[in-house]
Image: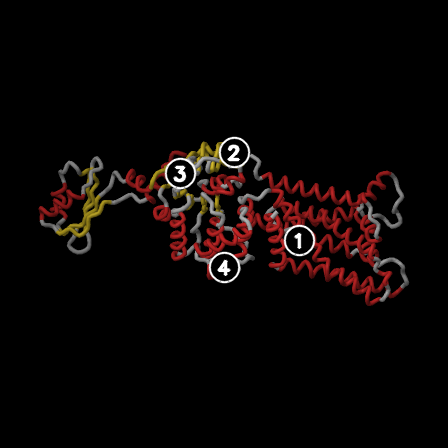
Amino acid sequence: MGVFLALVRRELGIAFNALTGYVVVAITLLLAGFGLTGLLDTLNSDRTDAPITEMFFGDGLVFWLIVIVITPVITMRSFASEKSQGTYEALMTTPVGDWQVVLAKYTGAVLFYLASWVPMLCVLVGLRQVAGVPELLDPRAMAGALLGIGCIGSTYLAAGIFASSLTRSQIIAAMTSLLIGVGVWASSLRPAGSDGSGDTVGRVLDHLSVTLQMKDFARGVIDGRALVFHLSFTLLFLFLTHRVVEMRRWK
Amino acid sequence: MSDESPMIEVRDLTKRYPGRTAVDGISFTVGRGEVVGFLGPNGAGKSTTMRILSSFMPATSGTVRIAGFDVFHEPDEVRRRIGYMPENNPLHTDMRVRDYLKFRARLKGLGFNRSRERVDRVVEQCGLRDVQKRIIGQLSKGYRQRVGLADALVHEPDLIILDEPTIGLDPHQIRSVRALIKDLGKRHTVLISTHILSEVEMTCSRVLILNQGQILAADRVEDLESRFSQDGRVVAELCATADAVRDAFRDLPEVESFDISAAAGDHVRLSLSPRNGTDLRPLVFETARQNGWALRELTRSRHSLEDIFIHLTRRQKGEGR
């Protein structure tokens, strides 16, 4: 356990020692700022009962833009840079298990991802205070949105870690996970008005649609199927990463 | 396992990469407490062998045991006993020296207090006290090398494997790193790879010469030198005329051939090859004394490790054709 914590600490350390960490937070805040101005426009123009979490996370593009952009930036470094700098060899010749390394890198990425959302959430809470309308930020919707951020992030980050384990180039790692990220998001887009209806294939696709899942989360609806979906994909990608790490020891 | 088993036991080790055999069926043993130099030109298979020894990657065939533990089947036991400094000494350049060493100590399974103790110790041992709060990326290469060494030492390994520890250092830094390695030899078994021959002569008790994936020679440095210096030529500078010298050495049974050339001043330079490996120095001295010639130089050329190395590696290249 001590070893695992030392590794996680190290992962977080890199993020905040180097510029990347701050760049990620800056990108998040910048994009979130755009989202916020849009949100304020909506709030000013017409009366709405929808909680702001739904407007921000459910309908807006900004949330997806943030997830798709920052997850590759957070994860691209994890294995690729260690491999290119040679520290991977130093790491893998210590008595640390392969799983420990994979999980520590993943945990570090998740913690950093969550941390980069904190300023944004503060803004939403602040907005609620300023607006003076408590219904705007329903705590249950807020909790749902948080869970959604976590679930979707966990899948995207696991995919990113996997992409990073495949290569020694951070650029290739980032591009690969960006591609996976955009692919997953694009495949879940629907033409307007097609929600809930359609043939069997359409219904299956709807269940796999991450945007629809996030809409539910943002309304405070927690669907067990979505949780299982993200848990399984996270585990799948981590398992694949472990296989890649282990491959070095194949004859 | 038992303390009697040799520190390193390599048998028929082969490593093939697609289209290339990096290490070709080598076998060697390193006893406890030895300091062994792994010598070879670039691409000879030194780093590959070291990576296999440190259980970073598996061999294609053959077995490697470290302190009796198989590197493939018991990698964790092996890693606990090895301090390995990979080629080019990779470090986390964004960390501070002390934090880095502590982090590494934790990875190597030392508890919190124990790692603090050990870090204090290796910081002292490797002369890092003045820089322990500094960021590794801002240190000179010599200091970084010491950080790498400190990392290799931090968990008190039985065996220390250093892949080209002095590469890229200036002469002062090389000296201090070598002194450190020599010091390590007192308490640990050390295996260092290098292509700098003088390094092996200075620090190692035994040398393994590796070329194109094969071991060409494995012996103590002195033994190698004496084995190869049997044709030891003798060079003398005498104050005499060339003709007189020629007459004196012409018909001696011990002399295979000789050569005379003019030297600075009134001297001639005489170079003799012995028959049957006799040492010709007493003979030259005796002749000079009898003739009343002043003798200002008398040396028997020793084959340096460098000659042996060039000789061995060239011969193999010739055979390969």
**Do the residues indicated by labels 1 and 4 lie within the same chain of the protein?**
no
Residue bearing the label numbered 4: B132
**For discs 2 and 4, the disc positioned in front in the rendered view:** 4
Residue bearing the label numbered 1: A74
Which residue appears at 20% of the width and 44% of the height? B259
Residue ranking furthest to the front? B113
Looking at the rendered image, the quarter that the C terminus of chain A falls into is: top right
Residue B200, compared with residue A133, is above or below; it is: above
Identify which residue, A142 or B207, lies in the foreground. Answer: A142
Dot 2 or dot 4, earlier in sequence: 2
What secondary structure is marked by label 4?
Answer: loop
Give amino acid for label 4. Gln
The span from disc 3 to disc 4 (Cα, nearest Å) is 34 Å
Residue bearing the label numbered 2: B60
The chain to which mark 1 is attached is A
- Could you tell me residue B229's position as x and y percent? 27, 40
Q: Would residue A143 be found to the left or right of residue B291 on screen?
A: right
The span from disc 3 to disc 1 (Cα, nearest Å) is 47 Å
**Do the residues indicated by labels 2 and 1 lie within the same chain of the protein?**
no
Give amino acid for label 3. Gly
Give amino acid for label 1. Ile
The span from disc 2 to disc 4 (Cα, nearest Å) is 41 Å
- Could you tell me residue A195's position as x and y percent? 87, 47
At label 3, counting other C-alpha atoms closer than 10 Å, the crowd grade (few under 14, some 14-19, many 20 or more) is some
Label at residue B31: 3
**Do the residues indicated by labels 2 and 4 lie within the same chain of the protein?**
yes
Give amino acid for label 2. Thr
Q: Marks 4 and 3: in contact by CB < 8 Å?
A: no
The span from disc 2 to disc 1 (Cα, nearest Å) is 36 Å
